[in-house]
Amino acid sequence: MSASILKVENLVLYYSTLRGVVKAVDHVSFEIKRGETLAIVGESGSGKSSTAIAIVRILPRNVGAYKGSVIFNGTDIMKLGEEEFRKKVRVGGISMVFQGAMNSLNPVMRVEDQIAEPLVINMGYSRQEAVSEALNALKLVGLDAAVGRRYPHELSGGMKQRVLIAMSLATKPKLIILDEPTSALDVITQANIMNLLKKLRNEMGFTYMFITHDLGLASELADSVAVMYAGKIVEIGPAESVYLQPNHPYTKLLMDSVPTLREDRPPSFIPGAPPDLINLPNGCSFHPRCPYVIRGKCDVDDPPMIKADHGSYAACWLLEKERK
Amino acid sequence: MTTREEILTLEDVKVYFPVRKLFSVTSYVRAVDGVSSTIRRGETLALVGESGSGKTTLGKAIIGLVKPTGGKILFDGVNISELKEDELKKIRRRMGVVFQDPYSSLNPGFTIYKAVEEPLVVNKIGTSEERREKVLKALSDVKLNPPEVFASKYPHMLSGGQRQRAAIARAIISNPDFIVADEPVTMLDASIRVEILLLLREIQQKYGLTILYITHDMATAKYFSDRIAVMYAGKFVEVGPTKKVLSSPKHPYTQALIDAIPDPDPRNRMAFRKIVTGEPPSLINPPQGCRFHPRCPYFIKGKCDVIEPPLYRFEEGREVACFLYETGSV
């Protein structure tokens, strides 16, 4: 059960722009075990989505650097050619549910055909088999088979999101990457989708990589949590320790900035703004906003990941001080 | 009636949008369908609802950007829905508005100075020296310091949070009494949302402003509003003091909305949330009776699907549109 399904090491994805090189993903490493959910949380521009597209190799044209190793199911998929990659990763390997359900369905194709299409093209199913698989997938996500005959404009936002999840399940993937799967939905619909994802995980043993900016939402699924800031993971560990005993000052301040409904704790904020990814500060990227900054250290040397308590790791020099 | 204490009174406000087929109007989208309430001077009222509940349309009707189809909107005793364009313009100076998207609400070709000064120019207020003084003061009010430096910048040179500050400066430049803030922090990052909301509150206290805070986010409403009005399918379903509504919500919809919101807690992943199913109804053809009845777990057959529940008063300052509270009505 606890074998790793995805192991990412020193993943780098830079974009080259007219203004300079954007370090979107900057030496990111993490591991996801079979049947577990890793949530990647961070604010906009922190590199969460870029990490995902780097793993599934859906890259924009302006890639400046793209390296590192991504070991999926025992194979380093960064070394695979396009055709091998398609066979091993795209078909039945890793599927991805993108942000903005509304726009990613083909408006002139019936739902069942959209779900069936990759099965026919990539997995060699007959059309009939593929459609019956598609209807199964719809049933799994709680939709009526009749929905299969409809067109996307006849569906509500929540139903479209369910269709996208059905689509990602149909190829029987080993890992599902969910990139802000509910951010365009209303809270009640969102809660329904989260319940569905939990149910699928419990019943079918799915492994998720769940990308979100919403810490509350991440806690709905996450067994472990990775917090990203300015293209790097600054803290990673089991959900309990990241939420309850955060080690990195950014994690702690981010938690404090989220207003909660049930607790009576006035939220605070982090002064300043996230840095420009083209022109990162020296040393730790968070040091200009950090209340615990150690002059002459944090603004000079970039901290490595340092082991903390309860299975967490954080990139902060404060931990080194505690160790000594 | 609007008294001194109330700056705004809504009486059965309706905003319908016609649905046209060829040249004839076939039906109406009832975005706001009979809303009555008051906003007290100096308070923050949070208008909470999901997308399509009519909250933004109501906000626009209040500042005179859309004309209500029926009912009255009294701003300081004046029915703004009956005003002519030039009279409306005068009264609108006393209102400010902050929109959701700071990336599109500021003209990219205007400097921050020009964007913030614009309401004064349009309304022909002051000489250019007086206006300059006002603009710089507004910029320092929203803590874009030093104001001279920010004044000469263009929107693309600012971060999202700074742009929203500039938008707030523009909203307060004509010394309004009342501000509509429509999802002002939704597009911003979590770490700076609270900063902007605290700034709004600071400005509110400094100038005695009344704020209508339109949001879908109950958690921010909890900390930044005095009272809350929950909207569903064009109607108010529950109104009351924020703390009371959130700690003991009465309307089944309010309860469902609150139950659906996850707090950051690693224990969440173990449990399923109890959620109402279904989706909000079509506003062209809303269900008869209570609009929430097809999704309501406490639905009373023969009643909720026939008669529309009025807003029952059941406690000091609390109102709820649900037959479950009929007996407790005053």
Image: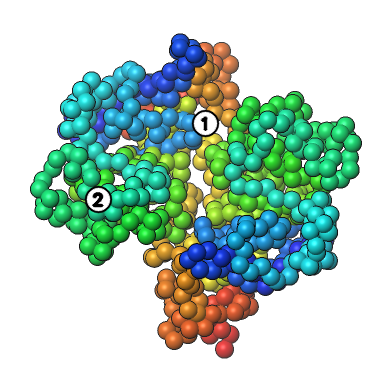
Identified at 65% across, 54% down, the residue is A210
Identified at 60% across, 50% down, the residue is A180
- A79, above or below B260, in the image: below
Q: Please state the horizontal and vertical placement of residue B234, each as a whole percent of the image.
A: 44, 26
Identified at 40% across, 46% down, the residue is B104
Kind of residue at badge 1: Pro
Q: How is the image coloured?
A: rainbow
Q: In which quarter of the image is the N terminus of chain A?
A: bottom right
- A284, above or below A83, in the image: below
Kind of residue at badge 2: Lys
Q: Please state the horizontal and vertical placement of residue A257, each as a whole percent of the image.
A: 45, 59
Left or right? Give the position of B318 relative to B250: left
State whether discs 2 and 1 lie on one chain. Answer: yes
- B64, above or below A259, in the image: above
Q: Which of A114 and A287 is in front in this view?
A: A114
Q: Please state the horizontal and vertical placement of residue B44, each as a whole percent of the image.
A: 31, 42
Disc 2, SS: helix
Q: Mark 1 points at which residue?
A: B252
Q: How crowded is mark 2: few (under 14 residues within 10 Å), some or many (20 or more)?
A: some
**CA–CA distance in space, label 2 to label 1:** 47 Å
Which of the two discs, 2 and 1, sits closer to the camera? 2
Disc 1, SS: helix
Going from the N terminus, do you reach mark 2 or mark 1 first?
A: 2
Residue A127 visible, this angle:
yes
Q: Please state the horizontal and vertical placement of residue B121, each as a whole percent of the image.
A: 18, 43
Residue A317's label in the rendered image is none
Kindly indicate the quadrant of the structure image that contains residue B193: bottom left
Kindly indicate the quadrant of the structure image that contains residue B317: top left
Q: Name the residue under label 2.
A: B114
Left or right? Give the position of A176 relative to B216: right
Residue B271 visible, this angle:
no
Disc 1: host chain: B
